[in-house]
Image (tube, rainbow, N blue to C red):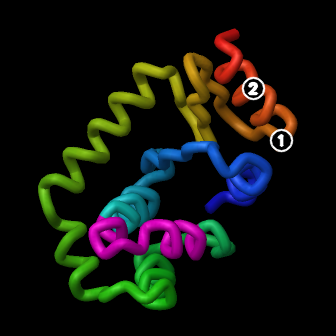
């Protein structure tokens, strides 16, 4: 999980997080997003996601598959699952949602009825959470 979200969840175990794949950085980004969604089918989304977040440099197909193997995924099954039409449909729905929320970059956070795009710190994220919980 992204370090900021790890901190937020550690400080507030009742916090519910939902990840949406938003591949905006070209073909490698789309490949990684499809792999993440397919990793979920094997119950290993978070280990895979965490592995990707820790990679440095260009995240090409080879690196994505290496991360998948290191996360304990069945890579052959992952590659097959990535081809499922439902994976592409889900990515398209995520992109539609991002457009509707006017999220045009990453990271993006939807907290209650507010949306924050770009980098923020723990204090800023916690303020958004507090406002949402207090109905502000």
Q: Position of residue 131 (x, y in %)?
A: 73, 19
- Residue bearing the label numbered 2: 130
Q: Where, by quadrant of the figure, is residue 80 drawn?
A: bottom left
Q: Residues within 10 Å of mark 1 (few under 14, many from 20)?
A: few
Do the residues bearing badges 2 and 1 touch, measured as CB atoms within 8 Å? no
Q: Where, by quadrant of the figure, is residue 97 drawn?
A: top left
- Residue bearing the label numbered 1: 121
Looking at the image, residue 4 lies above or below residue 119? below
Q: Quadrant of the N terminus?
A: bottom right
Residue lying at the far left in this picture: please name it: 85
- For numbered disc 1, what is the local secondary structure? loop
Say which of 67 and 131 sits in front: 131
Residue lying at the far right in this picture: please name it: 123
Q: Is the magenta region chiefly helix, strand or loop?
A: helix
Mark pair 2, 1: CA separation: 14 Å
Does residue 134 appear left or right of residue 96 in this picture? right
Q: Which residues are magenta?
A: 38-52
Q: Where, by quadrant of the figure, is residue 129 drawn?
A: top right
Q: Position of residue 26 (x, y in %)?
A: 44, 53
Does residue 128 appear left or right of residue 82 in this picture? right
Q: Position of residue 29 (x, y in %)?
A: 45, 58
Looking at the image, residue 102 lies above or below residue 104? above
Question: Counting residues from the N terminus, which is met first, the one under dot 2 or under dot 1?
Answer: 1
């Amino acid at each position: 999980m992204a370090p900021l979200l790890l901190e937020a969840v550690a400080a507030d175990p009742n916090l519910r997080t939902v990840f949406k794949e938003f591949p905006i950085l070209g073909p490698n980004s789309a490949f990684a997003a499809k792999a993440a969604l397919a990793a979920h089918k094997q119950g290993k989304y978070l280990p895979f996601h965490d592995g990707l977040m820790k990679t440095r440099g260009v995240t090409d197909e080879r690196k994505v598959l290496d991360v998948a193997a290191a996360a304990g995924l069945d890579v052959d099954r992952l590659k097959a699952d990535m081809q499922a039409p439902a994976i592409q449909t889900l990515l398209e729905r995520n992109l539609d949602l991002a457009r509707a929320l006017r999220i045009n970059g990453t990271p993006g956070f939807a907290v209650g009825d507010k949306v924050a795009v770009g980098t923020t710190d723990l204090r800023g994220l916690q303020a958004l959470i507090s406002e949402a919980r207090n109905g502000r």
